[in-house]
Amino acid sequence: MSIPRPRAVAIFSLSLFAIFFVVFALQLGAKASAPTTKAKAATNTEAAPVETTVSEAEEPVTEYVEPEYEEVPPVVTSSS
Amino acid sequence: MNAVGTAEAIQSHGWWLASRASGLVALVLVTVSVFLGLTMSAKVMRRPGFAKKLLAVHEQTALAGLVAIAVHGIALLGDPWLHPGVAGVAIPFALGFKTFFTGLGVIAGYLAALLGLSYYVRRRIGTKLWRKAHRATVVVYLLGLTHALGAGTDASAVWFRWWVMLTTPIIGGLFVYRVLSARAKKQARQRAPRPARRPAARPAGKGLAKPDFGSGGV
């Protein structure tokens, strides 16, 4: 049994419309749900390691600086 | 897939989704219809009985395309974000969103309705005039394509670009072929030797006045 041509064109058009509608809705749904998962990940502080960045200015000085010693004259003690 | 997110998307963006989908369906149907029309007029396929079938599909895809264009505009009326109003949808360049490209879309819609539906009154307006006007249908395709590329959400999508890159050269090629073949036919007709003109035998009582042999009168 063959489908009459006008009906075939109508079915084709409606099917195309339905496919586009569903695919776009799925895309939109996926996009809408994406930020909520990101937010959940951000609040989960136990799992996520805390990264700290240290700027160059704040970097600790690791070079060893030799302390300067004053020359102290030897203490002479006289024994009587 | 997130079913809840999809259901929410349909609830909040249903009108926009419907308009977007119907706009693409309209573009596909107009492309198919213009392709078939150009194929018929260029006489690319000359199988016996095929022209009649092509004409029927051409007509039906054009009508379905007009319905899709109407749905595309009407569905936008319900979109709470764009909120175009009747004027924004019906009057070219009245919408505040991508005014130039949406305006071209409105013009394309009116032209499609005018050129498509004039087929049913072609005898009233004259078949020759209708045929001349119907040739401008390719403008509807170009305006619709420009509208979709400039204002469409899917203009940057890879699949849409592929569709445009595949269909546009075919339609363009057929249009150029048709114009060139029509010009060549016209030139051939002009070059062909015309048969010598003979005064046509006129039936008695028409055209020239009969000589009055004084049968009464003054």
Image (cartoon, rainbow, N blue to C red):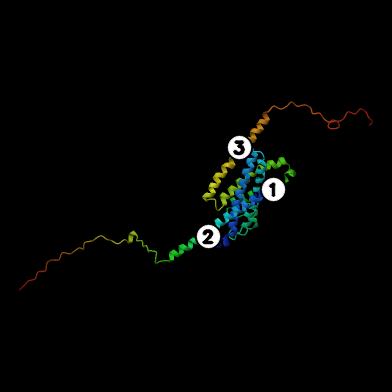
- Residue B208: horizontal and vertical position, in percent? 84, 30
> Disc 1 residue type?
Leu
> Disc 2 residue type?
Gly
- The reply to whether residue A37 is visible in this rendering is yes
Residue at the spot x=65%, y=33% of the render?
A: B185
SS assignment at label 1: helix
Residue at the spot x=60%, y=51% of the render?
A: B25
Q: CA distance from mark 1 to mark 3?
A: 26 Å
- Residue B76: horizontal and vertical position, in percent? 61, 57
Q: CA distance from mark 3 to mark 2?
A: 46 Å
Q: Using the image, tell me which numbered label, if any, was put on residue B117.
A: 1
- Residue assigned mark 3: B177
Q: Chain of mark 3?
A: B
Q: Mark 2: few, some, or many residues within 10 Å (few <14, many ≥20)?
A: many
Q: Mark 1: few, some, or many residues within 10 Å (few <14, many ≥20)?
A: some
- Residue assigned mark 2: A29
Q: CA distance from mark 1 to mark 2?
A: 39 Å
SS assignment at label 2: helix
